[in-house]
Image (spheres, rainbow, N blue to C red):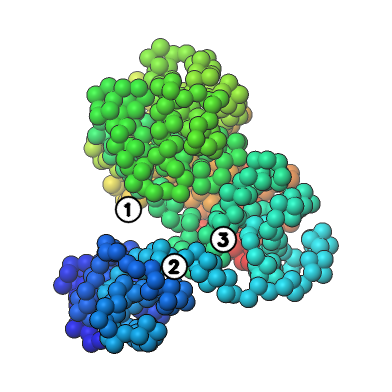
Amino acid sequence: MKKKARLDQILLRLGYATQDDIVRALERQKARGGRLGSHLVALGILSDVQLVEALATQFDLPWSPAVERDVDPELARRLGAGMVLERGVVPLDLARGSLTLLVADPLDHEAFEGARTSLGAERVVVMLASPRVVEALGEELLPQDARERRAGTGVELPELFEVDARPPVDDVDPTDPAAPRSRLLMVVDGAAHKNFLPPVFEKESCRLEVVSSAPDAREALKNGTFDQVIVARPLWDTFAEWVRTGAVPAPEVEVTVFPSVHGSLVENPAPYDLTVRSLRIAMQALAEERARRVGAGPPYGLMAEDLDALGRRYGLRRLALDGLNLGLHLLIPSTGSGEGSGGPFDEFPTSLELASALRFPFRVDTLLGVCHALFRGRVKPDTPGEWGEEVHLAAQLLALVWYRHTVVAASQEARGGVPGAALRGEAGALASLEMIEVYLRIIGDRGESAEEGHARDVLLAGGDRVLRTLSARLRRMGCRTLDTGDLDDAATLVERGAPAAVVVDDDVFRDGTAVFCRLAKEAPVLIYVLTDSADASRTLALLDAGADDVFSPPHDFDLVAARVSRAVRARARGRGEGTGGTGGGEFSASFEIFSFLDLVQTLSHSRKTARIEVTRGSGEEAVVYTHQGRIVHAVYGEARGEEAVYRIIAWEDDGRFVVYPESDPPEPTILAATDAVLMEGCRLLDESKV
């Protein structure tokens, strides 16, 4: 078959791809091989149907997005499963010596000729379709025993190595640097996996144990501790039944379903973490826009944090946790005026439609439907339906968190009150009393209470800029935002103790900014100033007036929001321990809440002269000094200077700090730039993990 034109030219003419799209696909093709069309589909630029149409145009062939004619299955049986399923050649018709074939590859001339010879045809007519359509039709036409024979043509290898011939896991010396660092249990059908996969995993420092029966799985889970359990999709229902009936103990770790070894390695162009992160960001942006349109401002960040904590406490799978997060961001609080208003949600039909369109592996649309039914009283917490226990549990968590942050929060702002009483009043309706008590314990562990209802409020004082650039970002990070265009109003709110932090746009108020800082610094509130002035003297004047930090150009509003939210969250969590306050010029938090790197960068940005006392969980202590924001000295045991900083960075989340103002830092032992010291410390930490 001759090509009428190049595929890229046809795609440009059809409007299915741009020149930039073609370049991206060509670069991918150069790196990985294969055909241009397959890379365009893998990148999401083309659909299967669009590629088939373009190829049909290129080779001047008829094509079909689906087969809508009656096809005689006898032809497929005569041609054989090898040709139909492996080569993707399905015979549609044989009449008067002419054989019509449905194919996915227009260049597989050898297969066309083989089909013509096998079926005794004089000539061949080719029709194009997508590989998915060709495979589905082939599966439909072939009898089940032929498909099974084809699936079983691989050689079933015997157990070449007895399990006992391998050293038992307990015999591995944990101090040996070459010892496996993690353990996986794979539940799969077939001996080949058991023979050959474990040595491959062990070369990558991971111990893999493969089982294919309930007794083997029970023995493995009884005798060993695994970091993860992975189950082949064909065995998932069987494995779930083993656990349900008690034949196998319920794993205490994440259970992941995988389609096949080949599929897991080849068919995922992007890691799951990156894909879900992108999906979450998109859902967050969509939620902000929908909420803004109906005049609502739910604290999605706080609710997501609560859902994650509750979900982990109840042992939900990673997939369910991600589904909960996506479902949360598809809900809009009721304002009594939107489409589908009434009850706890606005625009609920739209939310369900979006959830269904997601096609996420965890059933988000079912989750939202059950959650809505709990609010309506049509479903009870103690009676799971056909949707299963995991979805039922997740729906209760979502209903409980939503009720706390929308209904109870609104009631508290109007009348005050104790959230525990309001939540317990919903026992048996939205969630079980046990679940509500677990939630209240989580809230209590964080040091939150009814009196701390404003502990994460951030007041934005200024014009449109701070609202446009910071309001949505801060809400996504778990803060609630207030706004005012009047510094007198801001001062009044600070005096009443309403916000945890204030962000002031210096270019709106100018001379009034420093006056406000002097007045507000007497209150337990964080003060941040956003300025367009690059003059260092202006920054120092605002810091001297009482500002905790000054953000000068160039502005990175994501960074501004992150620093403000982190400080506010640290303040909220530290209150219960008597830390995080501004009294005495001290600030403290754990590295888990506010990392050492973030702390140093914050002090550097604000040009603070300070003493940082750090303590590790094991009791080790260190001290770091900064002068006008630059690290000048550090001591950790016998280590001095940069080496001491590198060791502190290696603590990662294991530690706490207290920051004190310092008027007379010691003689410098660190001459390198602070950024250079931090980067080198991070590099050494990364190398230590290899």
Circle 1 residues within 10 Å: few <14, some 14–19, many ≥20? few
Q: Secondary structure at mark 3?
A: helix
**x then y, percent, for residue 211:** 69, 59
> Which of the two residues, 536 or 548, is positioned nearer the viewer here?
548
Q: Could you tell me how far apart the alpha carbons at marks 3 and 1 are, in whole angstroms?
A: 25 Å
Task: Please report contact status of discs 1 and 2: CB closer than 8 Å, yes or no.
Answer: no
Nearest to viewer (mark 2 / mark 3): 2
Give the vertical position of 524 relative to 657 (above or below).
above
Q: Residue beneath label 2, please? A: 142
- The quarter of the picture where the N terminus appears is bottom left
Circle 3 residues within 10 Å: few <14, some 14–19, many ≥20? some
Dot placed on the residue nearer the N-terminal end, 1 or 2? 2
Residue at 60 percent of width and 36 percent of height: 313
- The quarter of the picture where the C terminus appears is bottom right
Q: Residue beneath label 1, please? A: 554
In-image side of 298 versus 639 (left or right): left
